[in-house]
Image (spheres, rainbow, N blue to C red):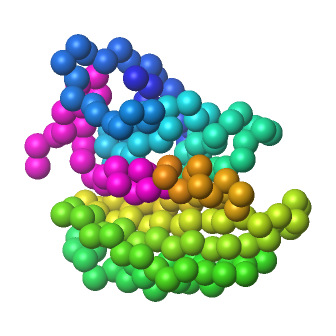
């Protein structure tokens, strides 16, 4: 298992051996990504390439420059408080309205309610200026357990059939603020 620790605005990768009785589970063909001991967790295809910098984590279907898609996530820990009234839909709508790409279509905002999180997402269809090619961008904001995340997924239109199931799995497995006591076991910390 590999995990990353933030160290002076850089993420340091640390590899740990899982214990035989670990509780980590993901669907076949996927691996589990965990940021900051469980602040954010979701599953990605097990053979995807991983990059990190001080601002975000990126997953690509192939090593650059041969990649055809980019899944990127950033997150913030929020101060203790009641975030239930935070306007997720209007925040996402503003992000979409401020997009500088040549957007030719937008979908309605989809809301996903979980026991401990609220998630909203939408899709943009645009023409990539460099490639003059149809592309899509899916944008998600998640908020729960005093953690806010932003996930974007950019891909070519002709790869949609192959890549939409990846997005579906990321959203299905997205968990916020379930902190892990021992990453070698996958056991959550008690409340």
Q: Residue 175: tell me if it is visible.
A: yes
Is-magenta flag for residue 36?
A: no
Q: Find residue 59 and report its horizontal and vertical position in percent.
A: 58, 42
Q: Nearer the viewer, residue 167 or 3?
A: 167
Q: Please identify the residue farthest to the left as the structure is shown.
A: 190
Going 55% across and 80% down the picture, which residue do you hit? 107
Q: Find residue 172 and report its horizontal and vertical position in percent.
A: 35, 54
Residue 71 falls left or right of residue 25 = right
Q: Which residues are magenta?
A: 167-191
Going 56% across and 65% down the picture, which residue do you hit? 138
Q: Please identify the residue farthest to the front as the structure is shown.
A: 161
Q: Nearer the viewer, residue 95 or 79?
A: 95
Q: Quadrant of residue 19?
A: top left
- In this rendering, the answer to whether 191 lies above or below 45 is below
Is-magenta flag for residue 177?
A: yes
Q: Quadrant of residue 180?
A: top left
Going 22% across and 74% down the picture, which residue do you hit? 82
On the rendered image, what quadrant is the N terminus found in? top left
Q: Find residue 169 and report its horizontal and vertical position in percent.
A: 41, 50
Going 63% across and 84% down the picture, which residue do you hit? 97
How many marks the image carries: the answer is 0
Residue 119 falls left or right of residue 95 = left
Q: Quadrant of residue 2?
A: top left
Q: Residue 91: tell me if it is visible.
A: no
Q: Find residue 76 and report its horizontal and vertical position in percent.
A: 42, 58
């Amino acid at each position: 298992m590999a995990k990353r620790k933030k160290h002076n605005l850089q993420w340091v990768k640390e590899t740990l051996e899982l214990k035989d009785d670990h509780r980590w589970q993901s669907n076949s063909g996927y691996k589990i990504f965990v940021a900051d001991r469980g602040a954010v967790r979701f599953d990605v295809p097990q053979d995807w390439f991983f990059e990190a910098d001080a601002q975000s984590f990126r997953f690509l279907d192939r090593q650059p420059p041969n990649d055809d898609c980019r899944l990127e996530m950033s997150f913030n820990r929020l101060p203790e408080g009641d975030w239930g009234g935070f306007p997720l839909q209007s925040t996402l709508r503003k992000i979409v309205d401020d997009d500088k790409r040549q957007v030719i279509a937008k979908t309605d905002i989809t809301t996903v309610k979980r026991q401990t999180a609220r998630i909203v997402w939408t899709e943009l269809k645009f023409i990539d200026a460099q490639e003059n090619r149809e592309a899509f961008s899916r944008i998600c904001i998640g908020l729960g357990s005093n953690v806010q995340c932003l996930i974007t997924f950019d891909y070519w239109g002709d790869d949609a059939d192959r890549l939409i199931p990846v997005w579906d799995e990321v959203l299905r497995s997205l968990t916020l603020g379930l902190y892990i006591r021992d990453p070698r076991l996958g056991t959550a910390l008690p409340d």
